[in-house]
Image (cartoon, coloured by chain):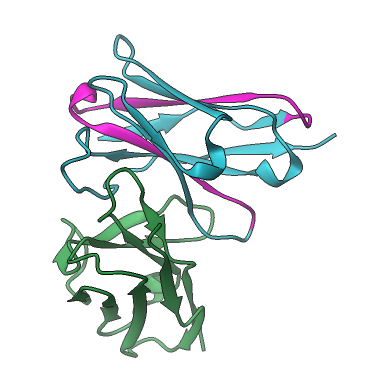
Chain colours: A cyan, B green
Amino acid sequence: VRLVQSGPEVKKPGASVKVSCEASSYTFNSYGISWVRQAPGQGLEWMGWISTYNGDTRSEETFQGRITMTTDTATNTAYMELRSLQSDDTAVYYCARASNDLSYKDCFDVWGQGTLVTVSS
Amino acid sequence: DIQMTQSPSTLSASVGDRVTITCRASQSINIWMAWYQQRPGKAPELLIYKASTLESGVPSRFSGSGSGTEFTLTISSLQPEDFATYYCQQYSSYGAWTFGQGTKVEIK
């Protein structure tokens, strides 16, 4: 079971970034995907979740209006787009496997390798 | 939102030591607690879920306990590969997961 993420990105302030997360060796639409980020030297911050079954999403309040999460079941890939980037968005962004059903309490049992997004003018 | 407070933030220990990390939730989360290990430059890995259930493949020297608001992660005999940062995570809130700030286990 693997989640493989896209490569590092360098963006200017105000730009957007789209990170991909390709799943393999499990039934993609049986599990949801959460997104977590980690600023340099800092802890883990949950950003949002998407159901790969019906596209339902939830996001942390601080990212609402700035984050879009989508999936492509034909390619078993989840995407996270973050807009209006600022320097404090510089971080490693992770995808992680979770439940597809929010009524089922679940943690994150499989993680992608991480994608470094650097925001710099 | 449920806040998670981990302590200590840094822990210095030697190989063979027994170490304990504590995590406190701002409100009851029943047993919906997970612990993760993160080595430098790597993604986090799940160690324990439902407060005390060991993830498949995780060595038995790791154990978790607690319920409600107080939880602990214990490593019974620290091994060289255990020097890493550990995070607790609550998953009681529907669609709102939160992590503790992390505990770095360093070599004394």
Query: In this view of the protein, which residue sits in the foreground, B39 or A84?
Result: A84
- Residue B82 picture quarter: bottom left
Query: In this view of the protein, which residue sits in the foreground, A62 or B65?
Result: A62
Q: How many marks?
A: 0
Q: Residue at x 59, y 60 (%)?
A: A42
Query: In this view of the protein, which residue sits in the foreground, B26 or A80?
Result: B26
Q: Quadrant of the C terminus of chain A?
A: top right
Q: Residue at x 53, y 53 (%)?
A: B41
Determine whether B28 is above or below A90 in the image: below
Expressed as whole percent of the image width and height from the top left, the position of residue B39 reads: 46, 61
- A1 to the left or right of A6: left
Q: Residue at x 16, y 64 (%)?
A: B54
Any magenta on residue A55?
A: no
Magenta range: A11-40
- A48 to the left or right of A102: right
Determine whether A115 is above or below A74 in the image: below
Expressed as whole percent of the image width and height from the top left, the position of residue A80 reads: 49, 27
Expressed as whole percent of the image width and height from the top left, the position of residue B71 reads: 27, 76
Determine whether A42 is above or below A94 in the image: below
Kindly give the residue lying farthest to the top in the view shown.
A74
Q: Quadrant of the N terminus of chain A?
A: top left
Query: In this view of the protein, which residue sits in the foreground, A89 or B28?
Result: B28
- A65 to the left or right of B27: right
- B85 to the left or right of A50: right
Expressed as whole percent of the image width and height from the top left, the position of residue B24 reads: 35, 76
Q: Residue at x 62, y 61 (%)?
A: A41
Any magenta on residue A27?
A: yes
